[in-house]
Amino acid sequence: MRCFLSLLLFSVIFVQLFSPDAPPAFAGTNEKIKAADLVTDNQQINTASSRYQLLFMELKAEHGFTAAELRNLFQGVAINRRVLELMDMQWEAKPYYEYWPRFITSATVRRGKQNLAKYQHLFDRVEQKFGVNREVIVAIWAIESRFGTNMGGFNIFQTLNTLFDAYPRRSDFFRKELLNFLILCKKNKIDPLQVRGSYAGAFGQAQFMPSSYNSYAVDFDGDARVDLISSLPDIFGSIANYLKTFGWTLNAPVFHEIGDELRSVKAIQVYNKGRLGRIDWRYLAQTQQINLPRPPGGGMLSIVGVLLGPDRGDKTRYVAGYPNFHAITSYNHSHKYAMTVSELAAAFK
């Protein structure tokens, strides 16, 4: 029996060491294989694979693409390894006191005010149509693309193909985005091979993902196409429509200061839940011993904490996030992003 067990153990170790499909035998390391490690830059994508053939069938059967169109589009499509490297990177989250100064500068505030004055009549129309404050639209425009001057340098068609084909963790998501991208380009007469944007697939002056483009972007200049690359009416109207869809109320509060400490167990629990935590505004006002404006429709509040930095004793500043704040977090889930948009918008006033 002892000989049998020894032979069995030897067999297991042999398989682990020499089988090409087996995981490392002694996986004592925390290193994980990254998507970028499995490919080479400009590696040709196999569009004859079943995943691409199914995609092509869907594009032809449901969205009116011809075989010739698809052949011209996908001929020679190759992987951009840098996209995978950036997706694999574990970026250290900057604290708020380091995050906001990247976006809220005297130059940005000055330019934002200039744009608000320059496009006043357009913003009048946008506010009347969508009920979204112009300052928050300009703040998002400023943060996403530096007022349209920096929309990203990655070829979006190549980026989405790279992520669909070579980023297994989110391949299904990027298949959907690639499909949406081709649909919106066909519908709006955009050359899909010429669009540039971010390494994650967002593009245009508002940095919409393709699925968001198809769901929330609007034709606000009346030319029968939606253009978030060069049409300011479409860009401003689309940002407004997005926020309106997620509950923005014109001139309602966005956030309110609630102090440098949380004074109830419930408030701490809500804070620890992050973006999804909610608390009744009356209870929060009572326990924090402050006056809070009533949210539209009596809506619930979130609790956001932002670190003030070493020069202010590393204290945390707590604010109550209102439904308008929650609408911004639908655009980007980060509380730091929503706070920066909110405070930049306030600076424009």
Image (cartoon, rainbow, N blue to C red):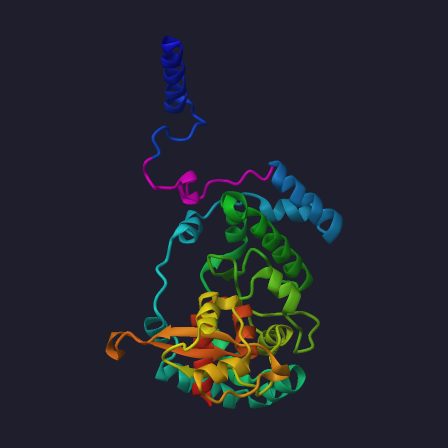
Q: Which image quadrant is residue 222 in?
A: bottom right
Residue 196: x, y in percent? 50, 61
Is 205 magenta? The answer is no
6 relative to 104, above or below: above
Q: Residue sitting at 55 percent across and 87 percent down?
A: 119
Camera sees residue 145:
no
Camera sees residue 192:
yes
Q: Nearer the viewer, residue 290 or 178?
A: 290
**Magenta segment:** 28-48
Residue 124: x, y in percent? 61, 89
Q: Residue sitting at 54 percent across and 72 percent down?
A: 278
Is 40 magenta? The answer is yes
Residue 192 horizontal side relative to residue 24, left or right: right
Q: Which image quarter is the N terminus in?
A: top left
346 relative to 68, above or below: below
22 relative to 322, above or below: above
230 relative to 167, above or below: below
Q: Nearer the viewer, residue 340 or 254?
A: 254
Magenta region, main secondary structure? loop
Residue 280: x, y in percent? 55, 78
Q: Which image quadrant is residue 130 in?
A: bottom right
Q: Residue sitting at 70 percent across and 43 percent down?
A: 57
Labels in figure, total: 0
Q: Nearer the viewer, residue 43 or 283?
A: 283
Residue 56 horizontal side relative to residue 137, left or right: right
Residue 287: x, y in percent? 46, 81
